[in-house]
Amino acid sequence: MKSLWKTFKQGIIYENPLLMLMIGLCSALAVTSSVANGLGMGLAMTFVLLFSEIVISIFRKVIPNSVRIPIFIIIIAAFTTMVDLVMKAYFPDLSKSMGVFIPLIVVNCIIMGRVEAFASKQGVLPAIFDSLGMGLGYTWVMVAISAVRELLGNGSVAGIPLMPASFQPILFFILPPGGFLVFGLFISFNIWLKGRMDKTAKERA
Amino acid sequence: MDLAKIFLVALLVNNVVLMRFLALCSYVGMTNDVGQSVGMGFAVTFVTVLATAATWPIYHFLLVPMGLTFLKILVFILVIASLVQLVEFYLKKNIPGLYAAMGIYLPLITTNCAILAVTFENIDYGYSFIQSIVYAVGVSLGYLLAMVLLAGVRDRMKTSPVPKFLQGTPILFIASSLLGVAFMGFSGLIK
């Protein structure tokens, strides 16, 4: 149980896919102009990751090593297609605003990376915890980035206006260059945080 | 919609990297020097055009008549992956010079999201075959342009005093943000 909890925590903080490993960046910058989009993308991603890891972990012993990459891609593509169709049917507005980024989950390096590095070697239970950790780690960073961008660029968070009426929205933060800027500062903050954590760990030791 | 407009919008106004955040992995990873970024840029251009030429007919003449359009994600990624393999074999055997120049980038291209995105968008926007090819060329040259620009900026950054808290990756995103601001100036180009 303890090791499962540790696996789960890895994805959320220590090996956070966006801030630490810096993979899967495309969608993280493109759809984070509002909290609704960021959350939707995070959950879609978590779904695909969870089910791909479960399926691949179940079949890990029968998948021949030499053709594993094409098989992984087919499995991931199947779940991505499901998410795409479900989003189009039940959340047409959300699906429209995210556009091509939902089908692009299939080439997101986070999924391929976790499937190759974790699910193809571990049992089902650890794979579930790993995918939930990575998925939620991705989701919280997405929500955090989009909250900053939406608050500064639109004066609201998740559609609820928070800023006083006299606040003039800074449109820059919703536009693409604002995404680069906010993400750059997020990484900078994270590096600082990690440096501090390492330092206190060393002092304790 | 005339072809020149499709081309310009894809190249500058909606630049694939700076305005639409596609292909960021290679944008951050492959711009250490200008030569490398040019090689990657041309390899992507080559494969994007080939992929468009392969997926457009498959979608319109195979998937649509058979009612299998929901399979497009699966089919497109497999087509692109096998296409990249074939191109690699062909270049290795017949044009070793070109293979030496861009062969090492080819395996990385399979999961380059810009290429897959272009093939999906050609379908979503309802482009004809010629328009699709023009769109593919525009997008991938836009990618080349962004790569070369960032590689140039990074060259200068090696000798400049970067503030300590921005050293490493953060400064790349700040520089991209400024490049993006410059590219927003192009949005007045097309009405």
Image (spheres, coloured by chain):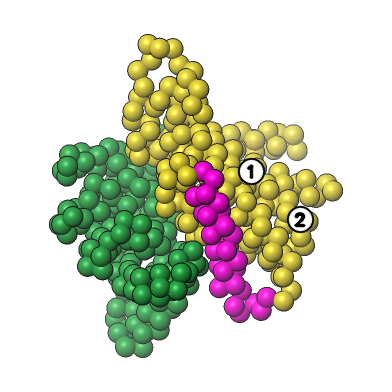
Chain colours: A yellow, B green
* Disc 2 secondary structure class: helix
Stretch in magenta: A63-91
Q: Which residue is mark 1?
A: A136
Picture coordinates of residue A101, whole percent (x, y): 45, 51
Is most of the magenta stretch helix, strand or loop? helix
| Image marks 1 and 2: residues in contact by CB distance under 8 Å | no
Q: Residues within 10 Å of mark 2 (few under 14, many from 20)?
A: many
Residue A171 occupies quadrant: top left
Q: Residue furthest bottom?
A: B93
The answer to if A191 sits in the magenta stretch is: no
Q: Which mark is residue A126?
A: 2
* Parent chain of label 1: A
Residue type at mark 2: give it: Pro
> Where is residue B154 shown, x and y percent of the image?
33, 49
Residue A90: quarter of image: top right
**Secondary structure type for disc 1:** helix
- Location of residue A36 with respect to B51 vertically, above or below: above
Viewer can see residue A47: yes
